[in-house]
Amino acid sequence: MKNALRVIAGAEMVVITVFFMPVIQADQAMEKTGVGDLALWSQWNGMAGKAFLALVVLWLAALLAVGFQAVQAKSLAQFRVSGLSALAVGAPPLFLVVGYVVIF
């Protein structure tokens, strides 16, 4: 299960990076006044949407994997939240909020 969490956490970090690249490009394609290249903005926005959907799926998989580990533990005291579990579950929402604050 740890290997699955490693793969999920690594994939989440890649998808977060892939998500922010088209977001920045879409922001540059469309100015705040509404003047800009609508087709290019739509293209970048679509890519960002697909990356966000992939991130949501990976995050839900991480939640299920950590929940499965908790169910497999004999008692709640035996279930310890490792750094890998915390990274796989906590990093995507944290990075999305921090990225939103930094970019916008």
Image (cartoon, rainbow, N blue to C red):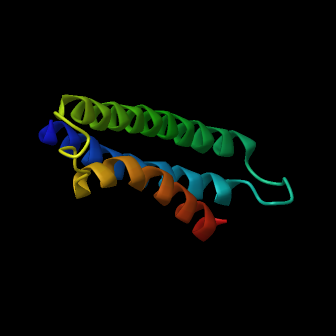
Q: Position of residue 12 (x, y in %)?
A: 35, 46
Query: Does any portion of residue 28 appear in the rendered image?
Result: yes
Q: Quadrant of the C terminus?
A: bottom right
On screen, residue 71 above or below 17? above
Residue at horizontal 32 percent and vertical 48 percent from the top: 88
Image position of 35 (left or right of 40): right
- Front residue (pair 66, 13): 66
Residue at horizontal 43 percent and vertical 40 percent from the top: 55
Query: Does any portion of residue 14 appear in the rendered image?
Result: no
On screen, residue 102 above or below 63? below
- Front residue (pair 68, 5): 68
Q: Name the image quarter holding residue 69.
A: top left
Q: Position of residue 65 (x, y in %)?
A: 27, 33
Q: Quadrant of the N terminus?
A: top left
- Front residue (pair 98, 75): 75
Residue furthest to the bottom = 102
Residue furthest to the right = 33
Q: Position of residue 75 (x, y in %)?
A: 21, 37
- Front residue (pair 97, 76): 76
Q: Position of residue 9 (x, y in %)?
A: 28, 47
Residue at horizontal 81 percent and vertical 60 percent from the top: 32
